[in-house]
Image (cartoon, helix red, strand yellow):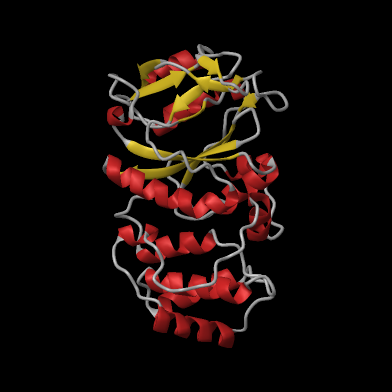
Amino acid sequence: MNAASLSQIDRARVYVATVPGAISGAGGHNATFAVACKLVEFGLAANEAWPLLLEFNQRCQPQWSERELHHKLEDAFRRARPRSGFASRTSRSRFVSTPKAKIDPQTALENFLRGFKCDELDLWEASPIRPPDDWTKDAACIVAMLYEANELINVVTNYQLDEEGKARPDGIGVTLPRNEMISRLARGGFQSEAGGWLRMNPLDGCDVTDANVTAFRFALIECDHAPLELQLSLLAKLPLPIAVILTSGGRSVHAWVRVDAATLDEYRHDVSWMLALLARFGVDDKNKNPSRMSRLPGVARSIGAAGDGHQRLLYLNPQPAQKAIL
């Protein structure tokens, strides 16, 4: 998801893919016109915007005729100004539209998915790197496949309980070179009643803040406001370069999106844009910092556990493409 590697069309396609289809009688005209105007704002020409508008139309209920869509796109070019530059993605719209009615995240997910379903087995079968048969080796597999030998990886198992009884990671944890971390993980060297956490991006070994991150490689997508099946289906359908999907052992699934930003500012900008697009689905918008932790696969939690509490790897792709998994 590096800014240098994403064309305006790619960025527009990601935006379109996150917008639920328009529904007749529920602001469908305004919703469709808003998408057309947004495509113009991305700086697309008419022949570039048209196929993306057709993709959006596939999710509309009922679908617009091509004549109606042509009219909306032509009107959008008359009323919306195209903007240049990657930074335009988070700017405010320059056209006036009727405010949309807010819907709850689960309804937004269902509208977007339109009956598409995906479960853990589907993701496991689609995974380019199959997770180990022994789920306790999942973390060792991730570290071996996603990091270089000279990179330092951080794991945290200490925790504090907040006022709601939820376990929060505490302290700086353990930071080790990749190969040493693989050996310790393979021996089952990390465990607590709260499970454990893994920082997605490598560190310099001095501390665990954003300033200590040495490669801005991954960003976290997490959503616990919908059933697990809907979360899995969303992650499988989004056209994002997802490298890892794992269960948290609780109510949510974690996905690591490959970002490969060049700087801290670029990382924050790109990730903020992505999370803003996904906010309608209840995705946590606080995961903007590169020192963010994800759940550590290969361990089990008892605090806040759902089912067996296993934190398991479901999908692993070291070189993900800018497209949906399924």
Residue 69 picture quarter: bottom right
Place of residue 90 in the rendered image (x, y in percent of width and height, measured from the top left): 38, 57
* Residue occupying image coordinates x 41% and y 52%: 273
49 left or right of 202?
right
Residue 180 in sight here: no
**Is residue 215 depicted above or below 7 in this figure?**
above
Q: Nearer the viewer, residue 317 or 213?
A: 213
Q: Quadrant of residue 93?
A: bottom left
Residue 127 horizontal/vertical position (percent): 56, 42
- Residue 184 in picture, x, y percent from top left: 46, 13
Rendering quarter of residue 287: top left
Whether residue 257 appears in this view of the structure is yes
Q: Give the x, y percent position of residue 46.
A: 41, 80
Q: Residue at x 58, y 85 (%)?
A: 68
- Depth check, front residue: 219 or 130: 219
Q: How many marks?
A: 0
Image: 202 above or below 260: above
Residue at 39% from the left image edge and 17% from the top image edge: 172
Q: Nearer the viewer, residue 279 or 97?
A: 97
Name the foreground residue: 322 vs 131: 322
Q: Is residue 313 above or below residue 282?
A: above
Q: Residue at x 29, y 67 (%)?
A: 84
